[in-house]
Amino acid sequence: MKFQPVIGLEVHAQLKTGSKIFCGCSTAFGSEPNSQTCPVCLGMPGALPVLNKKVVEFAIRAGLATNCTIAHHSVFARKNYFYPDLPKGYQISQFEEPICRKGWLDIQVEGQEVKRIGITRIHMEEDAGKLVHGDVPGLDDGSGVDLNRSCTPLLEIVSEPDLRSSDEAVAYLKQLHRIVTWLGICDGNMEEGSFRCDANVSVMPVGSDTLGTRAEIKNVNSFKFVKQAIEYEIQRQIDLIEDGGTVVQETRLFDPNSGTTRSMRSKEEAHDYRYFPDPDLVPLVIGADWVQHAQKELPELPEHRQQRFITELGLPEYDAEVLTASRELADYFEECVAFHHNAKAVSNWLMGEVTRSLNDSGTAIEACPVTPRQLAELLKLIDTGAISVKIAKTVFEEMWKNGGEPQAIVEKQGLAQVSDSGEIEAIIDGIIAANAAQVEEFRGGKEKVFGFFVGQVMKASKGKANPAVVNELLLTKLKGP
Amino acid sequence: MDIFELTIGQLANQLKAGTVSSVEATKAMLERIEAVEPRVGSFITVTPESALAEAEAADRRIAAGDAHMLTGVPLALKDIFLTEGIRTTCGSRILHNFIPPYSATAWERLRGCGSVLLGKLNQDEFAMGSSNESSAFGVTRNPWDITRIPGGSSGGSAAAIAARQATATLGTDTGGSIRQPSSHCGCVGLKPTYGRVSRYGVIAFASSLDQVGPITRDVTDCAIMLGAIAGHDPKDSTSINTPVPDYTAALTGDVKGLKIGLPKEYYIDGLDRDVQAAMDRAIETYRRLGAEFVEISLPHTDYAVATYYLIATAEASSNLARYDGVRFGHRSPQAAGLIDMMTKSRSEGFGAEVKRRIMLGTYALSSGYYDAYYVKAQKVRTLIMGDFTRAFEAVDAILTPVAPTPAFKIGEMVDDPLQMYLSDIFTIPVNLAGTCAMSVPAGFSASGLPIGLQLIGKPFGEETILRAGHAFEQATEWHTRKAEI
């Protein structure tokens, strides 16, 4: 029997607000344990939550960017369960009335058609704290509770079970990641857990319309692991069914070391969360003008920009996608193109030299030492034939390391391209004279030797000779009188 | 007259005139507490040292001419209000060692006026109870008859007024917890409109019902206290941002033409004879003063107690989850592992009434029962609110008894919680509707126990009921009687 996987993702995106969702404490990562806490996020007796307006704005932005309907009336609910890192004994979340509903995202897996993935809902909630096991100062043997993260604002973005492969799941996740970082509402840092996902995976026989029993894989925090975890889980479920077993509904954990998933708790032990509207928070009412304002403030979205790069600037699809991976990169690109209209040349340089240098030095594009204007100047020098591509790379390296304008660097270091045919002719003559054997070979019909001569000439000119001129002159001289 | 006998109004005049200092007043109160406390048991914690220091500061403020009516006035708070650096137990063993790092907004405001804190008052554990018998710190006795309960859950706050152990106190009212003990102890007690006073720093029992209010000797003091604590608090999302009127200015003594509703569902057969007689006399008094009476109907009254015990316990089961022994309060010393630690800490820390209500609330919210209980209760609550809205289209205030009987004997109802729940039958609908109500002394039973009448006002209609209560007070002398203790 052939099986069809069915996958839905629940993504938790930590919002880039300066303060927490229900109090004024900082959300900075990595501070001294419990240094960013107050009575509210510690769940002290008598403390009450007050909603951070910025969180609502970010949620509206996320909803609009994923084609959701923004609810005029939404309600915060309490999700009750006991855990030591959950100070109030409940998490404030949204349940029956979330802020956003019924959206979608288009994804494309290489070689396949564009596919529309439904988004069931987006809701706001607070994060819990964390437990620190072992090596806790003041504790010989035990666990500590760090509540710095408690009350940190999260968006939970829940997809429909529309995904049919691990590749689709990763494509969806990447698309969502690009959008939330693009909107500036989430830093997208998966290692720090700012963007993490739970995957609901089930399998059903191909052609069936009844969904199989699903397992939920908790808190996977890299694209690679998501792919691995889903693939492992699909195979595990198929093997189980083929061996005559049944899949049980349960929560599973992914172990990156072994690439496998294992049971965390079964449905029998599952919590009854006893959701009910939080009486400490009044219902959230969002007027149409607020949504309209947010819509107006929304930046051009990555997909739209990607399309525009193709249709208006004539970029290949691949380039357009790479350049819209982040808003900062796309901005850099467009700024550069504004100075130098050769979009493809700019794209090549951004995807090549610039990206390589950024990666090697661990620099973000926003902090790139070469400005878009300077890069444009450099590319102009290539297009006008003032320097070769090869020389340009040397100039770029100098700009990256020590700064400076490309024209000035070329002049100072004497890197200008030599197009003077007299000067080049002299070099060619010398090379021909010194390599009589190769000349014979060429004349005997072995045209591949031509490349050898070009290389020799370029070497002798230290790369400065204009290749077009070199080609032309060499051909004439080699063919002989 | 002894200093401890003075009302806020009287004491403030003497402090201003310089005939008494706040230090003297505070010392007099502390001595009075010491003298009667063994018989009353209204305090959990007395704070003489900080009280005297605050009194000295108040005297300096008065001397500098920067005094508020409440500057230098010795007050005490139900132990449900957080007081920075002062143990706050909420009447529970689970918080027996809890010293809060911050203070409730209501107390912050009084402290800002220069009030002096004498200590923290006994209460039913987590404000759950109608008799003050569920406190982990022992019972409080009714100063009018120490074999009887003072009422609950703000029993300590009412008893302390009746026993003259504080000039005024604060309590909280979730289903009648200010009005019922005020009635039983012969005090004035006001439950303001929900959202009128901040709940920040007040230990939550049922968040959608809880409201902070004063318990005082007379209506004037009540108006002064409400004026000091009312108003928007950005730290409480449910506190409402409307201006605070001058409540003392509302005390004109005039109720001519005031339309008062008498809900037929409240004047039931089986109402205690003394209570009925007090109500009849009160109606007579108001008529004489020129008020008009209208029979009204609050048709969903029968469902109020059941609705209340679903909503209040549901919210309480969630609100009390934070007492788990992890970060503060009681932690069981002999626990193995996490679940065991939480289970034992809660089992040892909570008393029977609290456990009963947590279980009820957990059940009402559990999947499969949520719609049948919690959701249904919310729907009935909406109907009850509607009853009041319609009633207030016809009347300015509603007059009812506060409690069906005067104070009962200590231990009399301990084994019959359902019967005890019915003692709040007249006060509970007001909390469900979120409106305001006040208890005013209106007579005594044949055996000499105080009886209060309840004036219910529109949402934010505190001025009207204060005016009506004040006029009644002017026309009667019930509030001037003293408990012999």
Image: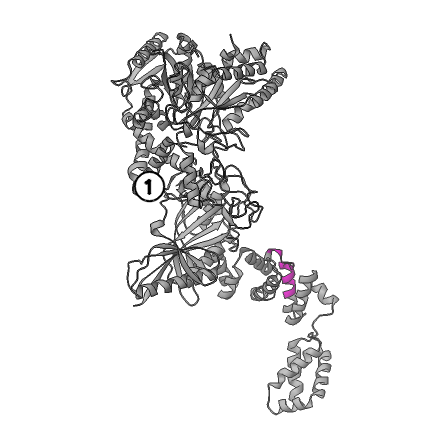
Q: Which residues are magenta?
A: A366-379
Residue sitting at 30 percent across and 14 percent down?
A: B276
Tell me the chain of label 1.
Answer: B
Tell me if I can see residue A256 in this picture: yes
In the rendered structure, which amino acid carries the disc numbered 1?
Answer: Ser
Residue A198, compared with residue A412, is above or below; it is above
Q: Position of residue A344 (x, y in %)?
A: 56, 66
**Quadrant housing the C terminus of chain B:** top left
Is A403 situated above or below B240? below
As rendered, which of A481 and B137 lies closer to the eye?
B137
The answer to whether residue B439 shows anywhere in this view is no
> Residue A140 location, x and y as percent?
54, 47
Q: Position of residue A98 (x, y in %)?
A: 40, 44
Q: Residue shown at 43%/10% (left/top)?
A: B484
Instruction: Identify residue for label 1.
Output: B366
Q: Please, which residue is most extreme toward the left here?
A: B269
Q: Position of residue A442 (x, y in %)?
A: 62, 89
